[in-house]
Amino acid sequence: MKNLLSIESLDSGRIRSILDSAAVMKSTRGRHDALPLTGQCWALMFSKSSTRTRVSFETGIRELGGNVMFLAADDIQLGRGEPICDTARVMGRMLHGAVIRTYDQKDVEDFADFSGIPTINALTDEEHPCQILSDLFTIVETRGSLDGLCVTFVGDGDCNVARSWIWAAARMGFELRIAAPEGFQPPGDLLARAGGNVSVTADLQKAAAGASVLYTDVWVSMGKEKESEHRIAQLQGYQISRELCSLAPGALVMHCLPAYRGKEITGETFEAHAETIFRQAENRLHTQKAILKMLV
């Protein structure tokens, strides 16, 4: 595997290999047998702000022996209109790998094609593969396996996180229910292309009943700020609360963060499940180290 650009591009065997490697990375942190990035320099090229993604990748690259530089869009000519293909051809002659967090999925794919170096999608408007791989690792770590898994995603069912969950369910064979109002549901062509046991409904209570995992994300993703008022009005009520959790006894409650208490999740529910939520955040480090090792 040369690049990690999407969950769509992975098969079940590759996903399981990443999850297995993440477990090893976590259990051997600080005493790895090998440092596969020794002598390498990687760039983090971010057009979108970040906390967990930046910290986990910078830490992970260094813990695997590499050096890392952070490049915001305005730090390089890309921010002044240089085509991604030209930036990629320069970076490919100097760097050993790149982690890109941006808007357009095609930019990440073009960078990988033109640079010829390992490229990781750290978030686009289309997918958030590193997040979902980390979430799957957290679920396996907590439940023991993905067998019999039923994930209910609550909120904007057409966001990048929900789209990656659709592909993960299709690849790994678990059930995914998306609870979202009309206008925030994934398009039919995406569902048809992905296949798998994925259902979409506006009935939040029906979607939550008996689920293994209740999962949510922010209502207003980066780049959607001008739509804030409309989004909040439409998504009002699609919230993980104590009452919703009562429909899925024992379910893991997960949030990819940042969380806006009182909107997609109540403050009470967030704090009651903070251990799981912050384990998710921690596991970004271990899963991304597994991805980095696999790419080199």
Image (cartoon, helix red, strand yellow):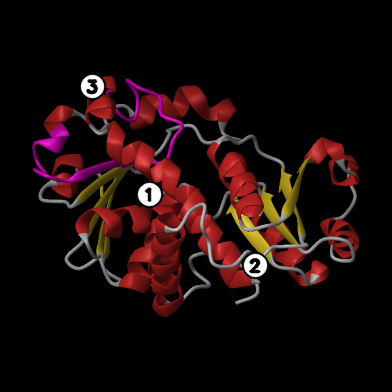
Q: Is residue 65 left or right of residue 231?
A: right
Q: Residue at the location (34% across, 38% down)?
A: 277
Q: What's under tag 1, amino acid-wise?
A: Gln
SS state under label 2: loop
Q: Residue at the location (72% across, 62% down)?
A: 38
SS state under label 3: helix
Residue position for label 2: 36
Q: Toward which corner of the image does residue 226 lie, by quadrant? A: top right
Mark 2 or mark 1, earlier in chain: 2
Residue position for label 1: 185
Q: From which residue to which does the magenta span run?
A: 244-266
Labels 2 & 3 near each other (Cβ < 8 A): no
Q: Residue at the location (28% across, 60% down)?
A: 140
Marks 2 and 1 sit apart, C-alpha to C-alpha, by 41 Å
Residue 175: x and y, percent? 24, 63
Is residue 95 visible in the rendered image? The answer is yes
Q: Nearer the viewer, residue 23 or 137?
A: 23
Residue position for label 3: 268
Q: What's under tag 3, amino acid-wise?
A: Glu
Mark 1 or mark 3, earlier in chain: 1
Q: Toward which corner of the image does residue 225 lie, by quadrant? A: top right
The quadrant in which the C terminus is found is bottom right
Q: Nearer the viewer, residue 199 or 10?
A: 10
